[in-house]
Image (cartoon, rainbow, N blue to C red):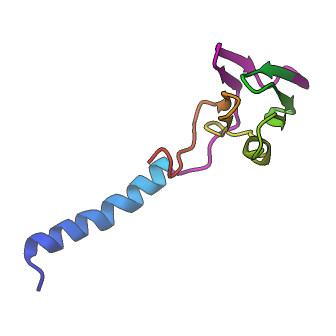
Amino acid sequence: MTTWADRVVLLFTLILLPTLYASLWHDAGAGESLRIITASGEETLPLNQGNQELSIDGPLGTSVISIENGQARFIHSPCRGKQCIHSGWLARGGDFAACLPNRVSITVIGRDPSYDSLVF
């Protein structure tokens, strides 16, 4: 048996969840810059400065990141699992890939980032 308080909480939840979904989980805008974080520091590069390949040294060796047409991706890394490479092209604000064994991560920075279950 439900009480009136249970019904109020249920109604509040049914109104709140779709509102939060519509306001937070939407298509993110195109990325503007790429933040690269390594064990030795952090660097931010624009994504629209033409095509380039970056070699970044880490504890295991060199990771190679490609920037093309406003998007970025790992194209080589010395780690075993290659999850960073399998992440594919990152183009929207909030997109993220990391080579944890080599301590290199990249994040696309945009005006309107997207949120996912990891952020939630």
Picture coordinates of residue 101 (x, y %)? 67, 34
Q: Quadrant of the N terminus?
A: bottom left
- Asked whether 95 or 82 is in front, the reply is 82
Q: Quadrant of residue 68?
A: top right
Q: Is residue 18 left or right of residue 102?
A: left
Picture coordinates of residue 17 (x, y %)? 37, 60
Task: Reply above or below: 97 against 45.
Answer: below
Give the residue at x 45% y 56%.
Answer: 21
Q: Quadrant of residue 38?
A: top right
- Asked whether 104 or 61 is in front, the reply is 61
Picture coordinates of residue 30 (x, y %)? 70, 37
- Asked whether 39 or 107 is in front, the reply is 39
> Which residues are the magenta region?
25-53
Give the residue at x 77% y 37%.
Answer: 79
Give the residue at x 76% y 27%.
Answer: 60
Task: Reply above or below: 94 against 46.
Answer: below
Residue 49 is inside the magenta segment = yes
Q: Residue furthest bottom?
A: 1
Task: Reply above or below: 79 against 41.
Answer: below
